[in-house]
Amino acid sequence: MKSIIRWDPFRTMRAWDPFDEMRTMQRDMDRLFDRLLGTERGGEVGRLGLWLPSIESYTKEGKLFIKAELPGVDPKDLDVTIDDRELVIKGERKAEKDEKEKDYTYREISYGSFERRFLIPEGVKTEDLKAAFANGILEVSVPIPEVPKAKKIEIKTEEPKKIAAETTVKKAA
């Protein structure tokens, strides 16, 4: 039979905690999947050749801003397009040519192609979109069109007509 007191090499006595076991198992499973998928850092998938840049999206002064963190990406390898109401950012971070000659100790930088898609508001004039790339950050600004304000419509009421009542009185006389 298993003891409810956990064996501790430092000889401290503490009660068995099933949630501690579950946390340990969760950490072990996370590490296993990180090693299998190559996602040991920031959710990037380096060894499979796929990665997703980190994104910020916010509104300010009547514009929607989308920022993508793209260190090591050559601006010539970026493509920003608009398709109907979808903004598409595509690109590639290319690996160094002598990559196979290196004996890596750590390899946490991901390389390869990526694509991110964002739904933009209706009525945006595509010619008003702007994109700028500086210091490894791509910033796209999208002017948000003004939404027509609700207009209150006055409801007119009419008094019910008394014609039907007058006709009934005349017939009775």
Image: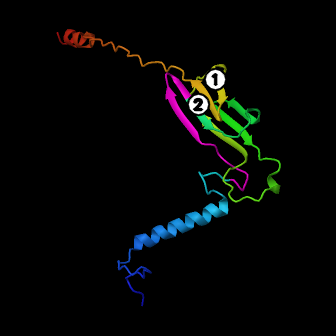
Instruction: Compare marks 2 and 1 and give the one earlier in the sequence.
Output: 2
Q: Position of residue 96 (x, y in %)?
A: 79, 47
- The answer to whether residue 50 is magenta is yes
Tag 2 secondary structure: loop
**Does 125 sit left or right of 8 as displayed?**
right
Which residue matches tag 2?
120
Residue at point 61%, 30% (across, down) = 139
Residue 38, compared with residue 21, is above or below; it is: above
Q: Position of residue 141 (x, y in %)?
A: 59, 26
**Does 46 sit left or right of 167 as displayed?**
right
Crowd tier of the residue under label 2, counting other residues whose Cα lies within 10 Å: few below 14, some 14–19, many 20 or above: some
Residue 95, compared with residue 91, is above or below; it is: below
Number of the label disc, if any, that sits on residue 129: 1
* Region of the chain picked out in magenta, as a range: 46-64
| Quarter placement of the N terminus | bottom left
Residue at point 37%, 82% (across, down) = 5
Identify residue type, mark 1: Leu
Residue 100, compared with residue 144, is above or below; it is: below
Residue at point 79%, 56% (across, down) = 102
